Amino acid sequence: MSGMDCYTCRHNEAFGTLPPRELIAADRHWRVAHAFDAALPGWLILVPLRHAESIADLTDDEAAALGTWQVRLSRALHAVTGCTKTYVVQFAEKEGFAHVHFHVVPRMPDLPADHRGPRVFAYLNAPGDHRVTAPAQDLLAAALRAHLTPADPDPATPG
Ligand SMILES: [Zn+2]
């Protein structure tokens, strides 16, 4: 499955016209978006630009950049949200969302005990009126960008 069947590929193919919340940062291999249906501000999604449905299918170059992105995004989330740490999770099990995607989630100091660990996913797939609004996501995107230092040795963006 790829192309129009895949939510992430449809967005990757629209790279040049994506709003800030869908293109917080990118390099030749990865794109960073704010989760569209999260109730938790700063819930980020890290996706490869190429369709892949298993981590084992990533190239060595994609893998090398992946580690750097996970750490850089975590640093930016610490700076912007005040989180105490980040959760990094990859399932890609939902219909239409088989494209590999890493959730990078700010674990806030006041996160209720019964929502820690895997149960933080209670904040995803939120009903419309509970979601972080699109304008709020765009503001977060701008704040995160300001904390993403251009440390990538190969920051070329596609398109
Ligand atoms: Zn895809």
Image (cartoon, helix red, strand yellow):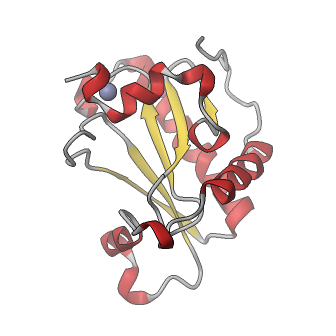
Q: Position of residue 10 (x, y in %)?
A: 40, 26
Q: Quadrant of residue 15?
A: top right
Determine the residue located farthest toward the right in the rendered image: 146
Q: Residue at x 40, y 68 (%)?
A: 126
Q: Position of residue 43 (x, y in %)?
A: 52, 58
Looking at the image, residue 59 sits to the left or right of residue 151; the answer is left
Determine the residue located farthest toward the front in the rendered image: 129
Q: Residue at x 67, y 59 (%)?
A: 136
The answer, for residue 52, to whether it is visible in the render is no
Screen quadrant of the C terminus: top right
Q: Quadrant of residue 54?
A: top left
Q: Nearer the viewer, residue 49 or 9?
A: 9
The answer, for residue 78, to whether it is visible in the render is yes
> Relative to 146, is 100 above or below?
above
> Relative to 131, is 29 above or below?
above
Q: Position of residue 152 (x, y in %)?
A: 67, 26
> Relative to 58, is 98 above or below?
below
Determine the residue located farthest toward the bottom in the rendered image: 113
Looking at the image, residue 63 sits to the left or right of residue 96; the answer is right
Looking at the image, residue 23 sits to the left or right of residue 115; the answer is right
Indicate the quadrant of ligand 1 in the picture: top left
